[in-house]
Amino acid sequence: MEREIKIGRKLSVFTYFFILLCVVGITVLVAKELNVGYGLEEILYQKDVASSVEQENKYYIKKIKDEYGIVVTFGEKDRIFATSVNANVQDDVNIANNNIKKIYSALQKYPKDVFNIFNGDYNLYIILVSNFNDNNIALASKNSLNQYRIYVSNTPQFERAFHHEFFHVLEYYMSAKSKNLYYSWNLYNPYGFVYDDNTSTLTDEGVYSEYLTDDTNERAYFLSKYSKVSSKEDRAEIFAEIMTLNKNESYLRRESHIRKKIDYLINGINENITISDFYFSSFLE
C-alpha cells in the first residue's frame, strides 16, 4: 500500500508538470498569434492610410483640372521631364499630398478669369519634383506647342515659389500678345543699374527689408537679391511677394519705388489678362 501511494504521488507530480508545459506552450502560441494578428492589422491600417492619401491626391488633382484647367502630376511617369530640368521625381505620395493641397489653396488667390488662358490653345502642367540637382527650387518652361510647365520642388517656400513661376507663365502669355510689355521697366530702377545673372556677386544694396530703417527702405528698389538677376526675375519676385502678403509692408506706400513697380506690373496684367482683383488687391488701397 505504501508503495502504491508513492507511485501515485510520482504520477501526480508528472501530471502537474505535463499540464504546466501544456499551459506554457498554449500561452506562447496564443501570444504569437496575437503578435501576428497585430502585425497584420498594422499592415492593413497602413495600406488603408496609403490608399486614402492616394484617393485624396486624385480628388484634388481632378478638382484643379476641373476648376482651373491645370494638370498636376508627380511620380515615375514624370522622370523624362524631371531629368530634362536636372530634377528628381517626387515619388512620396504623402509629400505630394501636402503640396497638391497647397497648390489648390494658392490657386484660389487668383481671379477665376485668369484661368481662361488654359481653356484654349494654352496648356499648363504643374510637375511636382523631389528636388533639383542644382540651386533651383522651381522653374517654368514653355515649348512651341504653347505648353507651359511649372516644376516645383518640396521646399518650405513652396507657395511663394509656385507664385513666382506662375507669373513667368503669365508673362509668357502676355508677351505673345503685347510686343511692348513692360517696355519701360528699367525706368523704375536706380539710375545706371544693370541686372546681373551672376548670383554670386549680388548684394543687398537697394533691397527692402523690414529690419531696415524707413530712411534706408525709402531707397529700396528690389524685394530680394535674386530680383537683380533680370527684369523678368524682378517682376516674378514682386508678384510672389505680394501674393503671399500677410500684413501691410512699408514698400506698399504709393510713393515708394517698389510700389511704382508693383503698379506697373499690375497694369500689364490688367491690359492683357484681367482687371479683376487678386489676393493682394486689398493691400494696395
Image (spheres, rainbow, N blue to C red):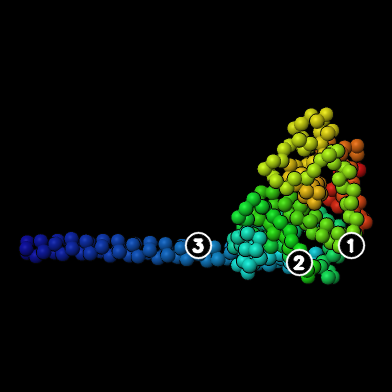
In the picture, residue 173 is in which quadrant?
A: bottom right
183 in relation to 59, above or below: above
Using the numbered discs, state the Cα–Cα distance from disc 3 to disc 2 in whole angstroms: 47 Å
Residue at disc 1, secondary structure = helix
62 and 257: which is toward the camera: 257
- Could you tell which of marks 1 and 3 lies nearer the N-terminus? 3
Give amino acid for label 1.
Lys
- Mark 3 residue type: Glu
Instruction: Indicate which disc residue 42 carries.
Output: 3
Asked whether residue 6 appears in the rendered view, the answer is yes
- Residue at 90% in and 59% down: 178
Whichever of callouts 2 and 1 sits on the residue coming sooner in the sequence is 2
Placement of the N terminus among the 4 image quadrants: bottom left
Residue at 83 percent of width and 36 percent of height? 250
Q: Position of residue 70 (x, y in %)?
A: 77, 65
Per the model, the C-alpha gap separating discs 1 and 3 is 57 Å
Query: Which circle marks residue 206 in the picture?
Result: none
Q: Which mark is residue 143?
A: 2
Residue designated by label 1: 177
Instruction: Choose mark 3 or mark 2, whichever is in front.
Output: 2
Q: Residues within 10 Å of mark 2 (few under 14, many from 20)?
A: few
What's the residue type where badge 2 is placed?
Asn
Query: Residue 246 at x, y = what percent?
Result: 79, 43
Front-most of residues 135 and 7 = 135
- Label 3 crowd (10 A; few <14 / some 14-19 / many >=20): few
Q: CA distance from mark 2 to mark 1?
A: 16 Å
Q: Is residue 266 visible?
A: no
Q: Secondary structure at mark 2?
A: loop
Q: Position of residue 7 (x, y in %)?
A: 11, 64
Instruction: Give the number of the mark in front: 1 or 3.
Output: 1
For the C terminus, give its image quadrant: top right
